[in-house]
Amino acid sequence: MKTLFKFDYGIIGCMSIWLLWSCQEKLPDPELSLQSPASATSTTVTVTDRNPDTFRQSLINAINQAGNGGTVKLLEGDYLTNRPIVLPHVQINIVGAGKNNTTIKLEQNPGPTSGLLILRTNGTTIKDLTINAKNNLQYGACGINTNGATDVIVERVRISNASIGVGTPDNGTGKNPAGLQVLNSNFWNCDHGFNFVRQYSQVQIPWVKKLVFRNCTFGGKMTAGISIDCGNDGTDGVLSRRALRGAAEATATITNMDGTEISGCTFEKAGKYNIAISKAWNVDIFNNTLKGNTGSIPFGEAINIEHEAYDITIEGNTITNEGLSNQEHAYISLLTFRDYGNPPLLENGCRNIIIRNNQFKGDVRTGITGEYARAITINGNTFQTPRPTRYDISFYVQSTNIWRWDNGNVNENIVN
């Protein structure tokens, strides 16, 4: 996938971000208040320690004391930390007093790390707080690193000033964010709000349990809102890369995202994409507002789909990529694979994509654009003024079965 780090049309270089664990050194015991348990098996522990040198260990101790299924409460105000926090192996609910009231702040650059909060247990829940990395994390590190934990819930959370808001950057070992739900949350000044990248030619991931992104906002300075990149693989690339370990198996793996849902979200203008998906299938994108690109990087789109992606539905969205008069941007792009200078091929293009009942507005050069695409349904869409300056719909290189109807009076260019 053209994962947002190499800015050529149709090119996203692989991102290799290795998980670097920080040591959990012994720090002073936390200041805790033990509340009455909600049930015989549920304990609530409140953390009041706000010292940046000790909060990390206080939170860890509170989680251990609350136990599986328990709750750790954070009060109003700021909780400061000088170091990343690797949560213990406990299924825990971390709950603040509201994302406008409770904030965890990273006060200094901790050096190499994969995140500020690094999870290790399935079913972890984080609610009602803000995580502000204050631009102290290295590139590729997450505000919340799911780190292979499944069924994580992030609800009513704001994540700001991090390289990645929520994600799983260490994919050389097959970790993925299976079952993640991000609900009613905000991402601000995160280069990527959500990012999942399966590292090149290592550990195939045929299936990822359904992800849900619902009623979230993505804004501030960002390259992309949501990026799902399930592999840049050598047998699609130049000859020198075809012999890499796992390349033949990896190129045959297009990850089933199990009906992953992106709905009701608002994406402010991004440097490159609002949503980008590569080498994945079974994704539904509906009822979102996408404001497209800033224009700072050429060839960006509100939604970019590429590299053998298929069975993706884009429906009922409002895409207003305005302010880019006649620039080489688009509302939606459907592209093949050309990351390593390899010739683009029909076999690596997208297929079975539905673009239906969306509203488009903005004077980009081309509205819906594609190459080497197959079985694309485009119907019931509305193109409002200002509209694309060259073509509303353009499949400019060999494509087959591009079905269009009920899109109004559109200017088309279809090369079969």
Image: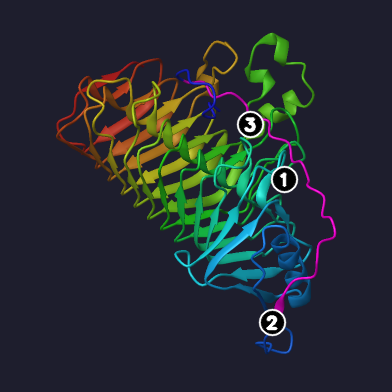
Q: What residue is shown with label 1?
A: 175
Any magenta on residue 211?
Answer: no
Q: Tag 1, which secondary structure?
A: loop
Q: Position of residue 202 (x, y in %)?
A: 75, 32
Task: Farthest residue to the right: give it.
Answer: 26
State which tag comes first along the sequence, 1 or 2. 2
- Over which residues does the magenta segment extend? 10-33
State which tag comes first along the sequence, 2 or 3. 2
Q: Position of residue 109 (x, y in %)?
A: 65, 42
Asked which quadrant contains residue 302, the reply is: top left
Up-down: is 150 above or below 114? below
Contact, CB < 8 Å: mark 2 with mark 3?
no
Q: What residue is shown with label 3?
A: 231
Q: Position of residue 229 (x, y in %)?
A: 58, 35
Q: What residue is shown with label 2?
A: 33
Mark 1 belongs to which amino acid? Lys
**Quadrant in which the N terminus appears:** top right
Q: Nearer the viewer, residue 318 or 295?
A: 295
- Residue shown at 72% from the left, 10% from the top: 240
Q: In the image, which disc is placed on residue 211? A: none
State which tag comes first along the sequence, 3 or 1. 1
